[in-house]
Amino acid sequence: MTAKNRTPSDAPSDIAPPGPGFLEFVGLMAVLMALNALAIDSMLPALPAIGQALGVTGDNTRQWIITAYLLGFGVAQLAYGPLADRYGRKPLLTIGVGLYVIFSLLTAFAPTFETLILARIGTGIGAAATRVLVVSIVRDRYSGRTMARVMSLTFLVFLGVPILAPTLGQMILLVAPWRWIFGVLALAGGLVLVWMTIRLPETLNPGDRLPIQVGRIALAFREALTDRISIGYTLASTLISGALFGFINSSQQIFFDVFHAAGLFTLIFAAMAGGIAVASVLNARLVERLGSRMIAHVALLGFIASGILHATVALSGHETLWSFAILQGLTLFCYGFLIGNFGAMAMERLGHIAGTASSVQGFISVGGGALLGIVVGQSFNGTTAPLAIGVTVFGLAALGFVLQAEKGRLFIARNSSAIAGA
């Protein structure tokens, strides 16, 4: 193969690519992804204040502040992949982060709850660019084990944000009104936008740009939606994400209204969210030895078992703050083993349409998960039972889709078409 015809996948990973050095590149990719987590978790302590200021009478209605963002984030992913394959990564990423900044500012100055919800949808649409394009940019610059190392380091930094974001929101509330939380989001997005504008070059090889062809995109969508393993694990991811979003939607009310432990909210939330980070680190160490299927399928059974135990405790009336923290923390720990492996297995046979497939899968799993999460959140009745039941039902349904994808077999790939080591 000549240098002229070489594609990014053929580029040797030991040659330093143009642009920022390795550590700076990892840091930039991590903070781009962190903008998303920051926009979800940082305002959780402020939900009561936002509702009071904007005249929201129903406590459950405040949950739309989270869900509106997730819906925008999920739906917009469908467009970013094909557009970035045509016009390049940096222009689309610049537009996305720019929208994040603009709509965060609009949220900060929103005069009504309806305006705030629309602005949150816009913020999610902008943030979706980071979800789709960071992986593409990393793949453009690196391959093989170097790419795996970059993604592992990126996610390690990214996973710290959900742990710290509620504390950041609480700290802002101690010195400023709730609107400053969204102002801080805009400031963070603006700083990242300046950093990437100055330091990040376009990473897509001009020869690899693909035209916008409706027929080609439709065929790629069809393949992603009809491949048994892809759609099975995508739908399983949707259900597991729904359980997570249900927890995020309900968490503030559970701590404030059920346990009357507002002062412990950020601390215990951080400890539970830390379980996801710990599981992700352990998964990175174990997956090459045990395989993604073995780890993910065992974790799914653990997810279901913890949900059943939690539902039993909640329905029996014996729930306490500490039983909730332990059992929900165990559920989140299992989640940390699930979501990455489910995503990897969903992409097993779609490497030739990775960009478009990632958009389709992200649209389904995040958009669908947001809708399921609001169902759980809106079911809040002053107890933890709706959340625990939701985790159990979604876990069992996810198991059904996994069994469908694997033709009834767990722990080991059903056939040789799966990638080695899966």
Image (cartoon, rainbow, N blue to C red):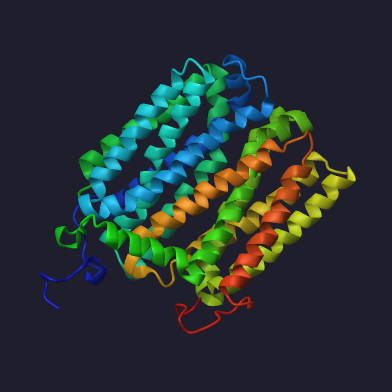
Identify the residue at horizontal 31%, vertical 59% (top origin): 217
The residue furthest front is: 215
Identify the residue at horizontal 72%, vertical 60% (top origin): 304
Q: Which of 361 and 252 lies nearest the eye of the viewer? A: 361
The residue furthest bottom is: 416
Q: Is residue 259 left or right of residue 48?
A: right
Q: Which of 14 and 92 lies nearest the eye of the viewer? A: 92
Residue 198: image x %, image y %? 21, 40
Q: Is residue 331 above or below residue 163?
A: below
Quarter residue 325 falls in: top right
Residue 412: image x %, image y %? 58, 79
Quarter residue 91 falls in: top left
Q: In this view of the protein, can residue 209 be seen by the observer?
A: yes
Residue 390: image x %, image y %? 71, 49
Q: Is residue 137 above or below residue 295?
A: above
Q: Which of 14 and 306 lies nearest the eye of the viewer? A: 306
Identify the residue at horizontal 62%, vertical 52% (top origin): 275
Q: In this view of the protein, can residue 259 be seen by the observer?
A: no
Quarter residue 222 falls in: bottom left
